[in-house]
Amino acid sequence: MTHAPLSNPAHAHDLHPPRGLLMAIGALILFTVLAVGATRIMGAGHVTDWRAISAESRALVFEDGVNGSIVVRDPATGALVRNWAPATGGFVRTAMRSLALQRRQMGIGSGPAFVLHRTENDKLIMEDPETGEWVSLDAFGSDNAAEFRKLLQPMETAP
C-alpha cells in the first residue's frame, strides 16, 4: 500500500507571501511614519518642561547635623530653614541621599544648593542644578511630599 505524500516537496521552500499582505504591511509602515511626523509638526503629545510652570521655588542647602539630624539652610543667608531631629525625616533623608549620590559620583561637593519647586498644579519637584537631576516628590505620596512642603513655609510656621 502506497501513501500519497502529505505535502508537495516542490512547494516546501516556496516562501512568497501573498502580495496583499505585503501591501498591507507597507501601508501600515507608511501610516506610522506619517502619523509620527504629523504629531511632531503639530506639537501634539509635547510635555511642557516643569520648570516653565514653577510657581514658587526656594534654594536650599542640606547638611548632616549632630547625631544624625538633618539641617536645612538658606544658601544666601545661612539661616536655619528646618532641622529634622535624629530618627525623623526618613523620606527627606532618603530622597536627598539619592540626589547626593549623583553629586559624589560626579565629584561635586555638598556645598551647592538644591532647588525645591512648587508647580502651578501644586506638585513638588526637588532639582539639583549641579547634576541636572530632579525628583518629583509627589510620586512618593502626599505624606512624604508634605515633609518637603514644610521647606517652603517660613520657619515660624514650620513645626
Image (tube, rainbow, N blue to C red):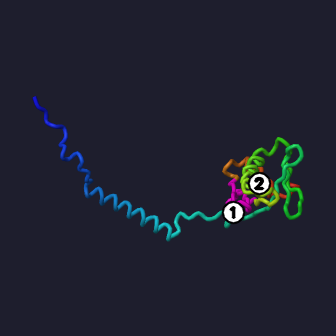
Residue 120 shows which numbered tag? 1
Name the kind of residue labelled 2 in the image: Arg
Left or right, 133 with respect to 41, comes to right
Residue 26 percent across, percent down from the top left: 34, 61
Q: Is residue 35 above or below residue 10?
A: below
Q: Is residue 158 visible?
A: no
Count residues near mark 2 (Cα–Cα under 10 Å), then give few for <14, some for 14-19, many for 20+. Answer: some
Q: Residue at x 24, y 48 (%)?
A: 13
Q: Is residue 12 magenta?
A: no
Q: Secondary structure at mark 1?
A: loop
Residue 72 percent across, percent down from the top left: 84, 54
Q: Residue at x 89, y 60 (%)?
A: 78
Name the kind of residue labelled 1 in the image: Glu
Please tell me which residue lies in front, 71 or 58.
71
Count residues near mark 1 (Cα–Cα under 10 Å), then give few for <14, some for 14-19, many for 20+. Answer: few
Residue 40 percent across, percent down from the top left: 50, 68
Left or right, 11 with respect to 153, comes to left
Q: Is residue 108 above or below residue 37?
A: above
Q: Which residues are magenta?
A: 116-136
Residue 60 shows which numbered tag? none
Residue 149 shows which numbered tag? 2
- Residue furthest to the top: 1
